[in-house]
Amino acid sequence: MEINGLSLRIKGKVQGVGFRPYIWQLAHRFGLSGDVSNDSAGVTVHLWQSPAVADFLQVLPQDCPPLAHIDSIATAPYHWVLPPRDFVIHHSGAGQMDTQIVPDAATCDACLSEMNDPANRRYRYPFINCTHCGPRFTIIQRMPYDRPFTAMSKFPLCAACQGEYDQPADRRFHAQPNACADCGPQLWLTEADGQAVTQDFAAVQQAAAALLAGEIVAVKGLGGFHLAVDATNAVAVARLRERKHRPSKPLAVMLPDADWLQSCVSSADHTALLGLLRSPAAPIVLVAKQPESPLCVAVAPELPELA
């Protein structure tokens, strides 16, 4: 049997991170033909023999998508019955899960820019995402990570979103949670008794007004509810502690921008701290309190640090 190609088996964080589109783009960059597919164990690539394969293999681990991480690449000779005419992406396969599930990721800069652009069709759409950011682990029902196996299966794509999903050169190619205001989840605000008040961006504005008025706002996110209050309002924080039966355990704080970060925490390297907070993981970070912080003491009583 003639060996006329190469097979790659790639394992790691390669599900739901735009890895197949990345392989497609890389193959086209080097003029290679073949195919790429993924299953519960990772990603498989078949390449037709070419001198450019060596360059492909060298660049492959260097330019991965932001959320991807390669643990191993196993290569093996491959036999093509017929030469492939192009490089194509195949649908996912099933099987026993042996790949890493990528956690949810904070909204990327590109999506934030679109969300804040009045000329963009996703202007002020809170559930914006792409292959570089957005929900992953929280919406997966079973592997492989494809839309029919996620919580997004109940939201059929509109023509515009489908076009993005089908275009390998697009940032949203095979982005499983891809959505917009026309076809995706919606946002609304209700009273405590469930009575609807308003929806869309007006819901955000009214919720913000309620926080500034000292009220408690329950925010339903991807993985459940969290209760929010104005962290500068001592009365509101005390009311929240009473409702949660949490007299002294510290509360996590959300800050809107770098100026607030500067005024609330004391750090030797604010740039590094800001980079960590704005990373895809967007973790809760423990940092020293700023002595003159505008936050009320009851947020983290008798503690030197703030979360």
Image (cartoon, rainbow, N blue to C red):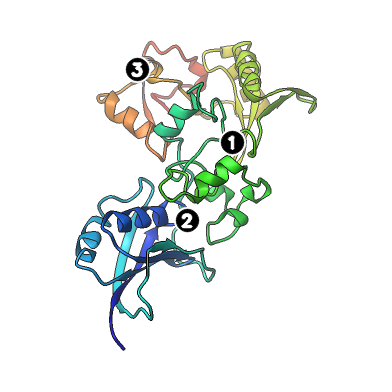
Q: Nearer the viewer, mark 3 or mark 2?
A: 2
Residue 69: x percent and y percent?
A: 34, 54
The residue depicted at 68 percent of the width and 26 percent of the height is: 243
Residue 304: x percent and y percent?
A: 38, 24
Q: Nearer the viewer, mark 1 or mark 2?
A: 1
The residue depicted at 62 percent of the width and 47 percent of the height is: 152
As helix, strand or loop, the secondary structure at mark 1 comes to: loop
Q: CA distance from mark 3 to mark 2?
A: 35 Å
The mark nearer the N terminus, 3 or 2, is 2
Residue placed under numbered mark 2 in the picture: 101
Q: Are marks 1 and 2 in contact (CB under 8 Å)?
A: no
Residue 262: x percent and y percent?
A: 35, 17
Question: In this view of the protein, which residue sits in the foreground, 169 or 304?
Answer: 169
194 w.r.t. 173: above or below: above
Q: Are marks 1 and 3 in contact (CB under 8 Å)?
A: no
Residue placed under numbered mark 1 in the picture: 180
Q: CA distance from mark 1 to mark 3?
A: 34 Å
Mark carried by residue 191: none
Q: Is residue 188 left or right of residue 1?
A: right
Q: Nearer the viewer, mark 1 or mark 3?
A: 1
**Amino acid type shown at disc 2:** Ile
193 w.r.t. 235: above or below: below
Q: Tell me the quadrant of the picture where the C terminus can be found.
A: top left
Residue lying farthest to the bottom in this orientation: 1
Q: Tell me the quadrant of the picture where the N terminus can be found.
A: bottom left
**Amino acid type shown at disc 3:** Gln
As helix, strand or loop, the secondary structure at mark 3 comes to: helix
Residue placed under numbered mark 3 in the picture: 262
As helix, strand or loop, the secondary structure at mark 2 comes to: loop
The mark nearer the N terminus, 1 or 2, is 2
147 w.r.t. 187: above or below: below
The residue depicted at 46 percent of the width and 35 percent of the height is: 107
